[in-house]
Image: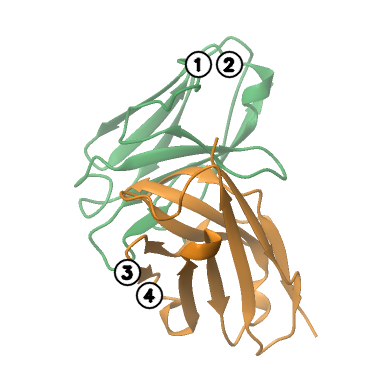
């Protein structure tokens, strides 16, 4: 069981927007602004898409955005494209001894 | 452009020690401000942080694996390594090395290497 809770799957049509949630506790997501999001295509390494809740690394499309409210962080993808179909993972700093935790991952299907 | 490349045995027998190395190119592993991590992903499952080492040599391990994990750095070869002892089938996974920039954030990843634990 993952420390952070994500929906197992989400789907959307090309051009639409979707949001993936990542729910933790006040000891991780809610307590710190160290939430990041990763995109993983099959057989590939994860790719950093969002860091520190809402910052995009250089080269990442501005269609990807992040936010946080309370103990829940969210990744929003606007203008869905076929290439966005992938697994998405959130991670967060935690004050527990593990220091870093992941969500269980969300499979995004572009219909 | 920083690149990381894992190498090591792809097949390990139960109870033996898994050993992997991550070669870093395009940058120095001794650069301050970064950590160097190992993260794994069992087939069809999610990501699990194993541990990391700072350029100073300080290490931090996932408590669930701490008794079996050792991460070390070889600055002369610009690489860092993972040893996981007493492996079982549950340790079968793709193992990634990655650079940490801030807490729980990794910006560069290796391509990953599949390690299978089987007799």
**Distance (Cα) linking label 1 and label 3:** 43 Å
The chain holding disc 1 is A
Q: From the viewer's perspective, tell me whether residue B112 is left or right of residue A46.
A: right
Residue sitting nearer the eye, A111 or B86: B86
Foreground tag (3 vs 4): 3
Mark 1 Cα-neighbour bin, 10 Å: few <14, some 14–19, many ≥20: some
Q: Quadrant of residue A81?
A: top right
Question: For the point 43% across and 76% down, which residue is it?
Answer: B64
Relative horizontal placement of residue A44, taking residue B47 as reference (left or right): right
Discs 1/3, front: 3
Which of the two discs, 4 and 1, sits closer to the camera?
Answer: 4
Where does label 3 land, which residue? Answer: B58
User: Which residue position holds label 4?
Assistant: B63
Residue on which disc 2 sits: A80
Of all residues, the one furthest to the right in this rendering is B119
Q: Colour of chain B?
A: orange
């Amino acid at each position: 069981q993952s420390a952070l809770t994500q929906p197992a799957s989400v789907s959307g049509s090309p051009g639409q927007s979707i949001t993936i949630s990542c729910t933790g506790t006040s000891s991780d997501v809610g307590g710190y602004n160290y939430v990041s999001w990763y995109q993983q295509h099959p057989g590939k390494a994860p790719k950093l898409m969002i860091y520190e809740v809402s910052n995009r690394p250089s080269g990442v499309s501005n269609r990807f955005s992040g936010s946080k409210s309370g103990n829940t962080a969210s990744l929003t993808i606007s203008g869905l494209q076929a290439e966005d179909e992938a697994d998405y993972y959130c991670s967060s700093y935690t004050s527990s001894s593990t220091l870093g935790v992941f969500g269980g991952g969300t499979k995004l299907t572009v219909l | 452009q920083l690149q990381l490349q894992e190498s090591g045995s792809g097949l390990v027998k139960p109870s033996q020690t898994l050993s992997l190395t991550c070669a870093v190119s395009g940058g120095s592993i001794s650069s301050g401000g970064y950590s160097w991590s190992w993260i794994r992903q069992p087939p069809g499952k999610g990501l699990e942080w194993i541990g990391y080492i700072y350029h100073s040599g300080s290490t931090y391990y996932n408590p669930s694996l701490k008794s079996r994990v050792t991460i070390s750095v070889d600055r002369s070869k610009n690489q860092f390594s993972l040893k996981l002892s007493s492996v079982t089938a549950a340790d079968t996974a793709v193992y990634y090395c990655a650079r940490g920039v801030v807490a729980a954030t990794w910006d560069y990843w290796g391509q990953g290497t599949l390690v299978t634990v089987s007799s």
